[in-house]
Image (spheres, helix red, strand yellow):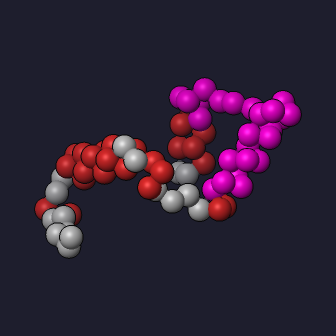
Amino acid sequence: MNRPLPLDKMTVSEKLLAIELLWDDLCRSPDDVPSPEWHKAILAEREKKVVDGDASFSDLNEAKKRIRKATQ
């Protein structure tokens, strides 16, 4: 299939909707979506921190504020 989307004619809302539709479709068959080895390693490292009690968690709204502040 080679039908490019008219991205230059789409609104931001339409683009976000397209992303959501693609993501929903990919989530229907997660085993078909390859995961890179580096991602598996990071997840294993994070899981180990949780098991060892070394992980810390943030409230989602506080995390968003920190990210916004760090990227300004």
Q: Residue at x 45, y 48 (%)?
A: 30
The residue segment tinted magenta is 39-63
Q: Residue at x 77, y 33 (%)?
A: 50
Residue 40 painted magenta:
yes
> Does residue 3 lie above or below 53 as drawn?
below
Residue 23 appears in view: no
Q: Residue 70: x and y, percent? A: 60, 48
Q: Residue 49: x and y, percent? A: 80, 39
Question: How many labels sit on residues?
Answer: 0
Q: Image check: 8 left or right of 46? A: left
Q: Image check: 69 left or right of 3? A: right
Residue 57 painted magenta:
yes
Residue found farthest to the top: 59
Our reading of the magenta stretch's main secondary structure is helix
Q: Residue 59: x and y, percent? A: 60, 26
Residue 26 appears in view: yes
> Does residue 58 lie above or below 3 as drawn?
above
> Does residue 2 lie above or below 21 as drawn?
below
In what quadrant of the picture does the N terminus appear? bottom left
Res 67 quadrant in image: top right
Near-viewer residue (72 or 63) = 63
Q: Residue 17: x and y, percent? A: 25, 45
> Does residue 27 lie above or below 65 as drawn?
below
Q: Residue at x 84, y 30 (%)?
A: 53
